[in-house]
Image: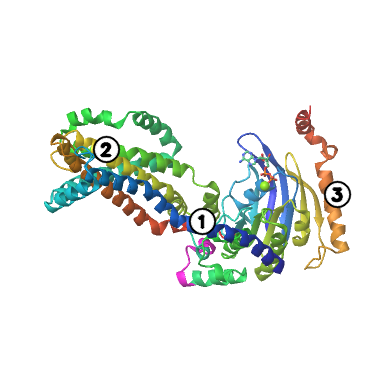
Amino acid sequence: MSVVAMTIAAQRSPAQERSAPSRRTRLIRPALGLIVPVTLALAWEIIVRLGWTSGRLAPPPSVIFWTFVDLARTGELQRDTLVTLSRVAAGFAIGAVVATIVGAVTGYSTTLRRLLDPSLQALRAVPSIAWVPLFILWLGIFEASKVTLIAVGVFFPVYLGLMGAIQSVDRKLVEVGRAFRLSDFAMVRRILLPAVLPAYVISLRSGLGLGWMFVVAAELMGASEGLGYLLIDGQQLGKPAEIVAAIVAFAIVGKATDWLIALAAAPFLRWEDVVRHD
Amino acid sequence: MLVLDRIGKTYPNGVHALGGVSLEVELGEIVAVIGGSGCGKSTLLRAIAGLDPASEGAVFLDGERIGAPHEKIGVIFQEPRLLPWLKVADNVGFGLGDRPKPERAERVAAALKRVGLADKAGMWPRELSGGQAQRVAIARALVPRPEVLLLDEPFSALDAFTRTDLQDHLLDLWADAKPTLMLVTHDVDEAIVLADRIMVMRLRPGRIFDEIAVDLPRPRDRQSAAFDFVKRRVLAALDRSLDRAAIGAEDEQKAEAGAAMWW
Ligand SMILES: Nc1ncnc2c1ncn2[C@@H]1O[C@H](COP(=O)(O)OP(=O)(O)O)[C@@H](O)[C@H]1O
Ligand SMILES: [Mg+2]
């Protein structure tokens, strides 16, 4: 036993030495990434202030900031953000639910996969924006067609991610479930679900990313409110700062919703973060 | 009593992995199955476990025919196969899902203490060393108090120190409730340290070629002359089992098919 303890101790020390510098780099690395954008922004600000250029088409950071504040003060920013957010939420909910159902059955049943997957793969090959005219003909130019387009965008990554995750569940762990005589339901709840969850969360997050992409497309093609409308408005009235402010709002809300999913899933995925000690 | 009645296995792809293995194992006996790789050891164990039922013959435990995993049969695989999303304690309690919570907690704690990992209860499987993980797997299999414990090369992925440590530990645990142990291994020392009987298997189709009783008192000294004597007998039997000439006439066809591969 003591010999074993000694060999374990001997194996452990080099690993700890290796982990020490990595902790330092982990703190430095994000700061490193900020250098370029912050320098560029500062430089642009100074160049405009010095009067070397008017900055009319590319407003400096301070102008963008004040445009952002003004839009928020009138309440326009909040209203547009809310409209866009609710479109994404509706599209994401529909797309994710349908994708989860279809992904689960095709991942579970080979027959259903052979039946459905080829058609879905063919549909996936169509660039989703190409559906827009058809959706507008079918559903009108208002909310329904926008939400449908977003749902289509969300559907594919979630469907593919979940189906793939179910298929690649470690058969050896499923066998542990069988050895302990789990019922079908218990097998799903105690083995398949937890095994699939990490990949499923990733697919939801990339689905959400596409949802945000598609809401921009949908709103650019005709909307009277929403962040995408703010983009068009800024373009037509020649207000680049408004465009950039809308882009910033997109980035913030997009990142926040992504972070919400990650946060909601975190308690179930804690086991993933653990680093091996030996 | 565990009874194997002419178990045969032909896989759907046509591989004739087992050809009529018969064996009777008394309650509390430790039987080691040894043989070259691919001779059907895992196939045999999986048939007994009910994970991959035999295509011919039958397995009986206390007169009951086994065709699917059974609560009296526990399995330990070559890898620990712990569920990475469950803490160590929940892994150990995995097979007690139907018991009330206090009883579960009590039995898990006792089992973890018994394998010397009480302080690891709240850890994730990834935080364990290979030997610790396999000890957790042993605890998980023993906690439902199986009558038969099947082990498929349980220590072969471990380093030599950890391996001998776990062999001794397994015997120690076995002494608590004395379940029947059936252990597949390709490590002759391991078979002799643990087993009352060693079944030497032969290839294509897998069947029992020789049976060697190990009449040494426990704990067994790996360095003793008696140990060495048994070891030489097992090695000789293994040698003969691999010898083409020893393959009986009834297998001529198979032998020819095998020989064809050398040309
Ligand atoms: N699921 C399977 N399908 C087809 N053939 C298999 C399968 N599992 C094992 N075999 C074949 O059966 C034979 C015995 O395999 P196995 O029982 O794993 O041997 P061992 O455990 O003694 O190394 C081998 O020839 C192997 O290739
Ligand atoms: Mg094997």
How is colour applied across the structure in the image? rainbow
Tell me which numbered mark, 1 or 2, is placed earlier along the sequence: 1
Mark 3 and mark 1 in contact (Cβ < 8 Å)? no
Cα–Cα gap, marks 2 and 3: 72 Å
* Residue nearest the viewer, comparing A249 with A144: A249
Residue A214's tag is: 2
Q: Quadrant of residue A276?
A: bottom right
Residue A272 in sight: no
- Chain letter of the residue carrying label 1: A
Residue interval drawn in magenta: B91-102
Percent position (x, y) of residue B93?
A: 52, 64
Of badges 1 and 3, nearer the viewer stands 1
Of badges 2 and 3, nearer the viewer stands 2
Residue A115 in sight: yes
Few, some or many residues within 10 Å of mark 2 (<14, 14–19, 20+): many
* Residue at numbered disc 3: B236
Q: Quadrant of the N terminus of chain A?
A: bottom right
Residue A145's tag is: none
Few, some or many residues within 10 Å of mark 1 (<14, 14–19, 20+): few
> Is disc 2 in the same subunit as disc 3?
no
Helix, strand or loop under label 2 = helix
